[in-house]
Amino acid sequence: MSKLRNKIIHDSKLNPFNDNFDINYIKSVVSELEDNEESHKLFPFLLLADDFNSLFQSTFNQLKKIIIESNLNYNELIEFIISSSNRHYLLLHKTSSTTKHELNFQDFFKRTIESIDKSIGKIDARAALETEIDNINILINYLKYFEGELKPSHEIENDTSRVDSIIKLMLSTNYYNVIRFSHEDALFNNGYIEYIKDSNTIHYKYDNVNELFLGKIGYYRLNRNVSAHFFILKEHLDNYSDVRSLISKNYEGKNQTKRIKKTKITQGLVEFELASGLDTNEFYNFLFLDVQLRTYYDFIYNVIMPNAEGLTLKDCLILFNMTQSIFNNVVTFNNVEDDSVMRIKEFGKFPSKINSNNLKFYLKSRTKYSAKQINYFLNLLVNKKDQRLNFWSYPFLEKNDFYYVPLLSFLSPLIFVLSDKWLEDSGFDLEERGSYFEKNIKENFTEALKNKKYDFMIPNISKYTLSDGKFEEIDLIMNLKNVVVIAEVKCIKYSLTPRDEFNALKRLREGAKQINRKTEFIVNNSEKFKNEIGDISGKKIIKIVLTNFPSYSGYIIEDVPIVDYYLIESYIKSGRISSYRYVTENGKITENKLRAEEKFYDNEDEFCNNFESFVFKPGYIEKCRDYFEFKANKLSVENDAYNIYLDSVEFKTV
């Protein structure tokens, strides 16, 4: 990364979406710019910063005006903003329910809706709903500034104006959020602005379009891998007769034989009644969450987290699923026939909160966890008062004796974002996760190669020390028949924001530099370590960075390929990747048919000879590229000062 890009990213005085923005400071930076290609490319970020700051200022001035004139107090604004979002979630849930369909995973990415602004055209349906959670994050963070200023509300004759205030708050935030996110994405991901003054056009572009494709393919593969595991499991479960013992086994006996009898909504407050018995729908929901974490975090799934009152990641998932069940029951069985909102109290038709003590009682009644463990878990879900609110990371907002809950980020969570937070807040950092990951890799690769009866040597040690005391720690060496694979293992977190992506790539870049240095050390001293690693003379050396998520597979950094564990495991273990067609009817899988299969090798020599081409340019990833297309999306609305476009890669809809 260039010094100038790094400065624009990290200097708050250059950030147009920050209170510290200083136009005079920008002018001084511009006056000292070097005359080179990078300065010319990044100059529009500085040139247009004042205009973007005007958007920032006008947006929050508009929000302030709406808030003050809303005739709603602080708690009401929070509740009705969340109720409004939950209303949209319920509407989408109602329209998307079907009884029979083919499970073509690509269709998950193809759902679109018409934009409010006709000039923009159709937009991704789920992305539009996810943006609403981002808008809520911005709004409630801003509302904190008014907590002690807003007067108690009172009934007014024209009550629709208070409803309009909620709608205006959401709409006013949306445009600002889209522009800011696009701006930051371009900055953090080696993008630039093409500015055409004559047509007032701002176009966010990227130096490396291939990386845009790889990012979307990685996200697609992540979800596809999870779904494939789930449908295989579900087909097995559909033929399983003793559901009671199966549930107890998967919950490891930590559940009580109680279920939710019914729920109701009273002015936004969710209430429930319990009864004896088991809930199979709840169990299936748990299995889907369970499969997601087992697919990518199996190596630490049952490890007790350092500061978590004896809880594991799986324990947290059991409690999370049972908490979800209350709101899933609300969504499924409390049908709101008239979903219109003409008066502010009509937002009370939609769920927005639950009593915190009732929720603790519920979890104590339904599980065998202690009160201390339940309290610890619930604190993992609650936004911290001294941090910026983020419902993707913490799906609850605690206020007085209630938890306020946006349904999308709670019932359709980014589970890897949540699990990363649970691990992080419980003192389980990336380095410690990496140690478990490394051990898991060695064990699984050893077992797979033994089953194939291939020649190999995988040392159990990681530290290689010379007689003079010099050493290197090398995570994985696979000495195969004809090649030697040397890997740096890097655990990364699931990326939610452009800054997260930047930090993940920074970590992988460090890994690439490390493996280049460590490989040179091993090759230069191979005779000294012959007892530990075997004979590697005359064999081709293949360097890789091995990571847990598929988000960056296909990247080449410092001449080193980035590869995810799932991809390498499929190469070593099965030697193929398969694609299936599923058809379901009333929740049951009625058809399961192999559609296509890619075979990587037929024998041990091909296994070794094809390894390098596989990691540098995986054929499966290249095939996934056909599902996507490169396009320029319009971001600006009609009558805007600028025509703003963003280059992106999206799933083909035709």
Image (cartoon, helix red, strand yellow):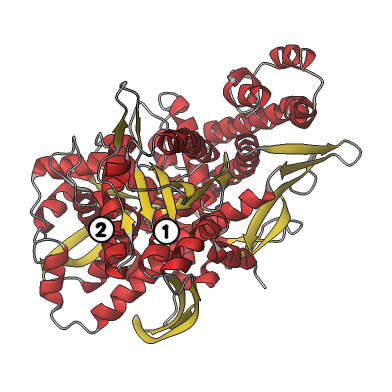
Q: Position of residue 130 (x, y in %)?
A: 50, 52
Report the residue at 48% width, 65% height from top.
Answer: 91
Q: Is residue 111 above or below residue 435?
A: below
**Observer-nearest of 107 and 401:** 107
At mark 2, the secondary structure is helix
Residue 110 visible in the shown view: yes
**Observer-nearest of 384 and 215:** 215
Q: Name the image quarter holding the C terminus.
A: bottom right
Q: Is residue 155 above or below residue 350?
A: above
Residues packed near mark 2 inside 10 Å, few (<14), some (14 to 19) or many (20 plus): many
Q: Position of residue 552 (x, y in %)?
A: 52, 49
Q: Position of residue 207 (x, y in %)?
A: 71, 42
Alpha carbon distance from label 2 to label 1: 31 Å
The amino acid pointed to by label 2 is Asn
Q: Which mark is residue 228?
A: none
Left or right of 599? Residue 324 is left
Query: Answer yes or no: do the residues labelled 2 and 1 have beta carbons within 8 Å?
Result: no
Extreme bottom residue here?
590
Q: Which mark is residue 568?
A: 1
